[in-house]
Amino acid sequence: MTDQTLPEKIANQLRRDILRGKLVPGASLKERGKAADLGVSRTPMREAIRIVAREGLITLRPARSPIVAMPDVKAVTDDVEVLLSIEKLSGKLACERATDADIDGIAAITQHMEDNFDTMDPLDMFEIDMSFHSAIAMASHNKPLAEIHSRFLARLWRARFLAAMKRRNRTNVIAHHTAILAALRARDASAVDAAIGIHLDRLTEDIGEVIRRELQDLQDKADQSAD
């Protein structure tokens, strides 16, 4: 994060607070108060909020404080369908175009996950996991594709984190990433497609389930407050 601007660093903190549940869906995000909490001025805080809003984690409101975005099952699962196609295309192109150094970098991420899965903070591990997928998109050497992948990954960041926590299983996670890596090393596009499919085969269902449960919990709390 050393090369990030101040708004980007603040955006990263907001993003992590949302993923950890410190900022819950529907919660108001008061710019002045949050800036004071983090010891920054309102200008970088305002820009950080805009960054996270572009990712869909925060909803901006005219003349009112922004709020942490409420999940929408249909919108999120639609995004997952697109992301799956992007990941498979990235894998196919990476088989054709990735340099040995690209694949060595992906291998290093995989090894880091394997070595630290049991001891690392789950959110830190999730971010490393997502860097694995980003590295494959970058290894496609197709800049527009990598940019689209980055945008969809950002939009699905929270949903994927919730799904990952639901199915946190070291054996499966390492096996899936190792299979994708092996297929990349073999330059076997069909094997990469199959390995990515296995890795993400239940993502739509898992995300839909956790979001529906979260919405129900929020509704239950609202009903209890109204009583």
Image (spheres, rainbow, N blue to C red):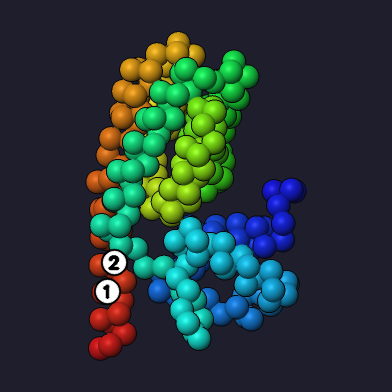
Q: In which quarter of the image is residue 120?
A: top right
Q: Which residue: 53% across, 76% down?
A: 29
Q: How far apart are marks 1 and 2 (CA)?
A: 6 Å
Q: Disc 2 marks which amino acid? A: Leu
Q: Which residue: 46% across, 18% down?
A: 95
Q: Which of 164 and 104 is in front in this view?
A: 104
Q: Which residue: 62% across, 72% down?
A: 46
Residue wearing tag 1:
219
Q: Which of 77 and 119 is in front in this view?
A: 77
Q: Which of 93 and 172 is in front in this view?
A: 93
Disc 1 + disc 2, Cβ < 8 Å: yes
Q: Which residue: 63% across, 68% down?
A: 47
The local crowd at label 2, few if under 14, some if 14 to 19, many if 20 or more residues have their Cα within 10 Å, is some
Locate the C terminus by quadrant. bottom left
Q: Where is residue 31 in the image (x, y as percent from the top left)?
A: 60, 78
- In screen coordinates, is 106 left or right of 45? left
Q: Is residue 218 above or below residue 20?
A: below
Q: Nearer the viewer, residue 107 or 156?
A: 156
Q: Position of residue 76 (x, y in %)?
A: 32, 54
The local crowd at label 1, few if under 14, some if 14 to 19, many if 20 or more residues have their Cα within 10 Å, is few
Farthest residue to the bottom: give it: 227
Q: Where is residue 78 in the image (x, y as percent from the top left)?
A: 29, 50
Per the rendering, the mark at residue 59 is none
Q: In this view, does 171 lie above or below 165?
A: above
Residue wearing tag 2:
215
Could you tell me which secondary element the residue under label 2 belongs to?
helix
Q: In which quarter of the image is residue 143?
A: top right
- In screen coordinates, is 142 left or right of 162? right
Inspect this view and state whether residue 115 appears: no
Q: Disc 1 marks which amino acid? A: Gln
- In screen coordinates, is 123 left or right of 218? right
Could you tell me which secondary element the residue under label 1 belongs to?
helix
